[in-house]
Amino acid sequence: MIESIKKLFYKYRILNFMLVGGIGYIINMAVYYPLMLVFKNEVTILNTHFYLPPFLISTYIAATSNYLLNKRWTFNDKDRQKQSYIRYLVACAFTVCLDIVLLFILVDYGHLKPELAVALALLVMFILRYIVVKKWVWKEKK
């Protein structure tokens, strides 16, 4: 039974990536919310957009956690890619830029609370992140 589950997760790496992403999402939100309380009163960026600095900090922490889990579990990388952490952070930076644009739109034009907007932005960007990570960070050698 356990072997068949392992084969299923190996065959469908997106399931692993999804599970790791779920863990990262929990980490991101667990770090983001307390940072919102700190940054809300102390930092003003672009007049009222105080939700961006905590988002960047929590996203970097979650991305590092996701990298370690994906490297070991999803892509079973034992130093196959020499610069996979740097590549992973660059891939995350690219998708985070899109996250920020989406976050800005959801908060400023959609009038959503920043906590809900962050959750939606992270979910929307999941598939794009998977494609970028699979094709660029841990691309299959031919």
Image (cartoon, rainbow, N blue to C red):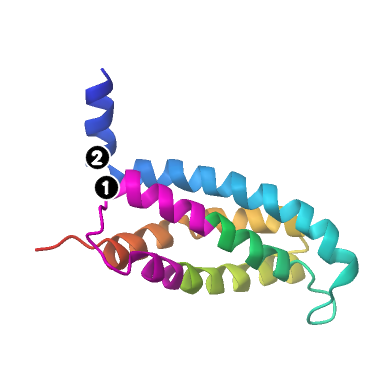
Residue placed farthest to the right in the image?
A: 41
Type of amino acid at the residue the image marks with label 2: Tyr
Residue that label 2 marks: 10
User: Measured along the vertical axis of the image, is residue 36 above or below residue 47?
Assistant: above
* Quarter of image, res 134: bottom left
The image shows residue 135 at horizontal and vertical percentages of: 27, 65
Membership of 64 in magenta stretch: yes
Q: Is residue 8 visible?
A: yes
Which numbered disc, 2 or 1, marks the residue closer to the eye? 1
Residue placed farthest to the bottom in the image?
A: 46
128 and 136: which one is in front? 136
Residue that label 1 marks: 76
User: Measured along the vertical axis of the image, is residue 129 above or below residue 11?
Assistant: below
The image shows residue 130 at horizontal and vertical percentages of: 38, 57
Q: Quadrant of the C terminus?
A: bottom left
The image shows residue 53 at horizontal and vertical percentages of: 71, 70
* Quarter of image, res 132: bottom left
Membership of 88 in magenta stretch: yes
Label 2–label 1 contact, CB within 8 A: yes
Secondary structure of the residue carrying tag 1 is loop
User: Measured along the vertical axis of the image, is residue 109 above or below residue 77?
Assistant: below
Segment colored magenta: 63-91
Instruction: Name which residue lies at 52% across and 43% down.
Output: 23
| Dot 2 alpha-carbon crowd within 10 angstroms: few under 14, some 14 to 19, many 20 or more | some
